[in-house]
Image (spheres, grey):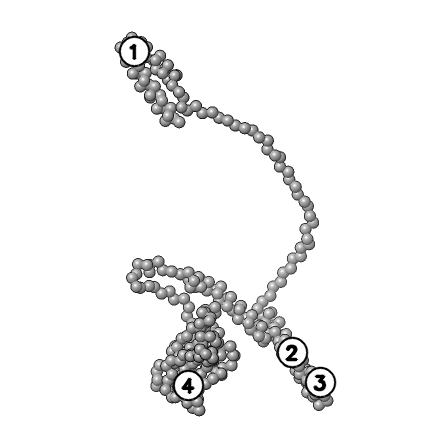
Amino acid sequence: YQKIKQDLAQMKKNMQQQSGEKAGENGDNGEDGADNLFENRKNQFNYSERAAQTFNNGYRERCIATQPPAVINFSSTVSQWEIFDKYMHDYATQINEQDFLRQQEKSASSKNKNTMNATYSSANQQNQDDMVHSQRMGNALKILERMVNQNSDDEIFQDFKYWEDASDTFRDGEGSLLPLWRFHTERSKRKQVTALAWNQNYPDLFAVGYGSYDFMRQGTGMICCFSLKNTSNPEYTFATESGVMCLDFHPEQCSLLAVGCYDGTVMVFDVRNKGNRPIYASSIKTGKHTDPVWQVTWQVEDLAKEL
C-alpha cells in the first residue's frame, strides 16, 4: 500500500510539472489543472469494511463429586534366595508325601491289590503335580529365557530385520556383511563344524553337525539344533559315536533329521524326542557300508507319500 501511495504521489508531481509547462505556454495555473485531473479520475482502490456482531452462548460448568474407592498400599521385598528356598521347601514336602504314599502302598499291597492300585495312581498323580519339574514349568522357563535374550540383544535383532548398508548401491556385484550372532557350546569346543541344514517349515531353526576333517584323529560327533529365538543355548542336542559329516531335514515331516556319519552309519533323529537315541540307524545287518557318508537327502514317493 505504501508503494502504491508513493507511485501516485510521483505521478501527481509529474503531471503537475507537465501542466505547469503547458500553463506557462498558455498563461494558466498548472496546479489547479492537475488537482482537477486527479479529482475527476476514478478511484480504483475504493475499499469498504463490513462487520457483523453476533451473540456468544454462555459457558456452563458441570461437575459431580464422587466418593473415591478405598486404596490399600501393599509392598514386599523378595530376593532370589527366598524364592529358591520356597521352591526347595515345596519340593521337599512333595518328596516326603511321595515317600509316605510309597510306604502306605507297600503295607497295603499284602492286604488288597485294589488298595495298592489306588495308592499307586494317587502317587502318580502327585508326580504329575510336581510344579518345579513339570513340563509346563519347562515350557514357561524356555519362553522366559527367549524373552530375556531378545531383550538383551534388542539392537542385534533390529539389525537382523532392518539393517541395510547404503554403500552397497555403489558397489557393482559386491556387498558388506554384518556379524550378528556366534553360536557355540561348551561340548563342541574341540570339534569342527562339518554340516549345516536349515528347517524348511521353521525358518529360525537350523541344525549343525560336529565332527573332524582330520581323518587320522576321529572321535565322537554331536548334533546341535539352534534357534534364532534363543541364541545362547541350543534347543536340542544329540551325541553320536562317530563324527557327523552331513545333515538334512525332511521337507514335510519337519521334526525328522537324517544324519550321515564318518563310519558309514546313517541315522534318523526325531528332534521332538528328549532321548538321545535315533528312531532309525543303519547297521551291518541292514547293509551298512564303512566309507564316510558325504551327503544325505530325503526322497518322497509321490504316489504313496511315504518316506
In front of the other: 139 or 273: 273
Residue, x 48% and y 69% (percent of image)? 230
> Which image quarter: residue 205?
bottom left
Q: Amino acid under label 2?
A: Gln
Residue topped by disc 4: 265
Residue topped by disc 2: 125
The residue mark sitting in front, 1 or 2, is: 1
Q: Position of residue 141 (x, y in %)?
A: 54, 70
Sequence-earlier tag: 3 or 1: 1
Residue, x 68% and y 45% (percent of image)? 65
Residue, x 40% and y 75% (percent of image)? 196
Rounded to the nearest angstrom, the CA distance separating label 3 from label 1 is 143 Å
Crowding at mark 2 (Cα within 10 Å: few <14, some 14-19, many 20+): few
Q: Amino acid under label 1?
A: Ala
Query: Do the numbered discs 3 and 4 sit on residues whose CB atoms are within 8 Å?
Result: no
The residue most toward the front is: 303
Rounded to the nearest angstrom, the CA distance separating label 3 from label 4 is 50 Å
Where does the N terminus fall, quadrant-wise? top left
The residue most toward the bottom is: 285
Total label count? 4
Query: Do the numbered discs 4 and 1 sit on residues whose CB atoms are within 8 Å?
Result: no
Q: Is residue 86 visible?
A: yes
Rounded to the nearest angstrom, the CA distance separating label 4 from label 1 is 127 Å
Q: Secondary structure at mark 1?
A: helix
The residue mark sitting in front, 3 or 1, is: 1
Q: Secondary structure at mark 2?
A: helix
Residue topped by disc 3: 115
Crowding at mark 1 (Cα within 10 Å: few <14, some 14-19, many 20+): some
Q: Secondary structure at mark 4?
A: loop
Sequence-earlier tag: 4 or 2: 2
In front of the other: 37 or 151: 37
Residue topped by disc 1: 23
